Image (cartoon, helix red, strand yellow):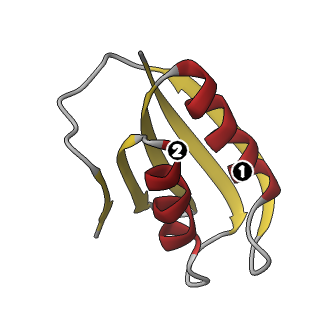
Amino acid sequence: MICKKIIVKGEVQGVGFRYFIKKEAERLGIKGYAMNKNEFVEIVAQGEAKQVEELIRICEAGSRFTNVTDIETIEIKIGDYKEFVIKH
């Protein structure tokens, strides 16, 4: 089990990106959240390493509505996430 914070930069706000990531995270069995920040989307993804890495690849590819320009990942402490949610 790992937990990573993923910072996704580019045209990722106001285009349904967080909802796209939520659907993919749930499909992969990942817990955590997606949240808009000033100039990026912050994602916390907790689950099996293989699934978290797959979600990172999905973030890099983006959805058909997004233009991802940069991704940063940071391993963080395991949290007490029960599901994957969108924070406002």
- As drawn, is 37 to the left or to the right of 11? left
Q: Which quadrant does the N terminus fall into?
A: top left
Q: What is the CA distance from the residue labelled 1 to the residue labelled 2?
A: 11 Å
Q: Secondary structure at mark 1?
A: helix
Residue at (43% x, 42% y) in the render:
29
Q: Which quadrant does the C terminus fall into?
A: bottom left
Find disc 2 in the rendering and name its residue.
28
The quadrant holding residue 64 is: bottom right
User: In terms of depth relative to the viewer, which is nearer, 87 or 39?
Assistant: 87
64 above or below 77?
A: below
Q: Position of residue 39 (x, y in %)?
A: 57, 63
Upstream in sequence: badge 1 or badge 2: 2
Closer mark to the observer between disc 1 and disc 2: 2
Q: Secondary structure at mark 2?
A: helix
3 above or below 84?
A: above
User: In terms of depth relative to the viewer, which is nearer, 47 or 72?
Assistant: 47
Q: Amino acid at mark 1?
A: Ile
Residue 58 bears which disc, if any? 1
